[in-house]
């Protein structure tokens, strides 16, 4: 569970408040998508939820943040990271720098936790298979493509089995097949009761997988609701977030979209609406 109460944040030595009065509660096992234009504060929000703010970045936090029953401010970072995984926007920064192969990289966090060898090997193998990167197991993490590094960074958090997983644009360098794998894996984690916060620009996939969408604009939480409501909202285009191509098709079809029917955000909703509107 994640709870923010009137959370505001300013980076050290800067005058601008980059998160403003954000209040929300994310129950255990919910998969929440975060959308917003560049500079909206999405990465900052991810760092707040995972404790890197204020423990690493400092700055001025007002309000309260509770994750998995712990006050983020009052809990030391090592204790927080045992239950919260953050996949950062730049996968290169996420690599430990201490390991020479992808398999060792995935085992790194488990070694630090003192997980027994047998379990470590089986968790690493499962993660390699799940993300279809078993063929990279012996490769150096530094000789991979950006997309492959992104899968390793995601794997290095998944293998830890945190109760809360926060991912900052995890599919930005992945092709459609790679993105699909990540979305499927996150859907499965949610089924297992993991709370997932996913910052993502791929609105069609978010609409399929998310329980809820937060729209962050200029540091403010402007919308918070189900994908069918938030992603179909007119304001999204004005805020520079865009629309799903299904919503765009229905808007472009104008009078051919059945009168009074909500705009679609998924293929199934679009197909049903156009079928109804067909002469
Ligand atoms: N370390 C920092 N020190 C000072 N200001 C920062 C720092 N990091 C980010 N900011 C500022 O905070 C605001 C929000 O940045 P943030 O990176 O959270 O946005 P974002 O929504 O993740 O954008 P993007 O989509 O480009 O990743 C921006 O105005 C940015 O310039
Ligand atoms: Mg960002």
Image (tube, rainbow, N blue to C red):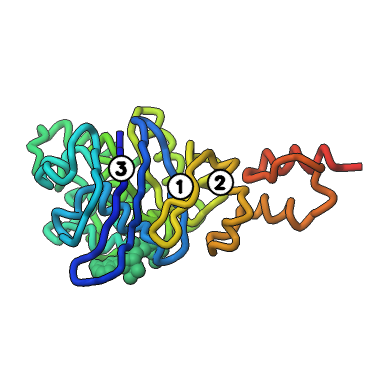
Give the labeled residue for mark 2. Answer: 230
Secondary structure type for disc 3: strand
Secondary structure type for disc 1: strand
Left or right? Give the position of 138 relative to 268: left
Which numbered mark, 3 or 2, is in the foreground of this view?
Answer: 3
Q: Mark on residue 93?
A: none
Q: CA distance from mark 3 to mark 1?
A: 13 Å
User: Of label 2 and label 1, which has the lower sequence position?
Assistant: 1
Asked whether the beta carbons under mark 3 and mark 1 sit within 8 Å of each other, the answer is no
Q: Give the residue displayed 75% in from the left and 37% down from the top.
A: 272
Left or right? Give the position of 113 relative to 149: left
Q: Residue furthest top?
A: 192
Of the pair 265 and 177, the residue shown nearer to us:
265
Q: CA distance from mark 2 to mark 1?
A: 8 Å
Asked whether the beta carbons under mark 2 and mark 1 sit within 8 Å of each other, the answer is yes
Q: Mark on residue 214?
A: 1
Asked whether the beta carbons under mark 3 and mark 2 sit within 8 Å of each other, the answer is no
User: Which quadrant of the render holds ligand 1?
Assistant: bottom left
Left or right? Give the position of 126 relative to 73: right
Q: Quadrant of the C terminus?
A: top right
Residue count near mark 2 (Cα–Cα under 10 Å), binned few <14, some 14–19, many ≥20: many
Q: Picture coordinates of residue 153 (x, y %)?
A: 28, 53
Q: Is residue 83 visible?
A: yes
Which numbered mark, 3 or 1, is in the foreground of this view?
Answer: 3
Q: Residue furthest right?
A: 279
């Amino acid at each position: 569970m994640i709870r923010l109460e009137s959370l505001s944040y300013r980076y050290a030595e800067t005058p601008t408040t980059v998160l403003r009065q954000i209040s929300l509660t994310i129950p255990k096992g919910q998969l929440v998508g975060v959308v917003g234009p560049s500079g909206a504060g999405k990465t900052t929000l991810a760092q707040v939820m995972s404790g890197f703010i204020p423990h690493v970045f400092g700055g001025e936090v007002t309000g309260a943040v509770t994750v998995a029953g712990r006050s983020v401010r009052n809990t030391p970072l090592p204790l927080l990271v045992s239950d919260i995984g953050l996949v950062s926007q730049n996968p290169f920064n996420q690599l430990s720098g201490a390991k020479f192969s992808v398999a060792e990289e995935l085992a790194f966090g488990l070694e630090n936790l003192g997980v027994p060898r047998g379990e470590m090997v089986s968790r690493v193998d499962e993660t390699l298979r799940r993300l279809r990167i078993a063929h990279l197991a012996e490769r150096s993490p530094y000789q991979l493509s950006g997309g492959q590094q992104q899968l390793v960074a995601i794997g290095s958090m998944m293998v830890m089995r945190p109760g809360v997983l926060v991912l900052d644009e995890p599919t930005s360098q992945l092709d459609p097949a790679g993105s699909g794998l990540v979305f499927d894996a996150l859907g499965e984690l949610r089924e297992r009761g993991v709370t997932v916060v996913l910052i993502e620009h791929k609105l069609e996939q978010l609409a399929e997988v998310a329980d809820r969408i937060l729209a962050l604009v200029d540091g403010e939480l402007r919308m918070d609701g189900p994908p069918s409501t938030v992603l179909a909202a007119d304001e999204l285009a004005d805020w520079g977030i865009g629309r799903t191509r299904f919503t765009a098709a229905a808007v472009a079809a104008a009078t051919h979209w059945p009168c009074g029917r909500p705009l679609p955000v998924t293929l199934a909703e679009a197909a049903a609406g156009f079928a109804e509107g067909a002469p």
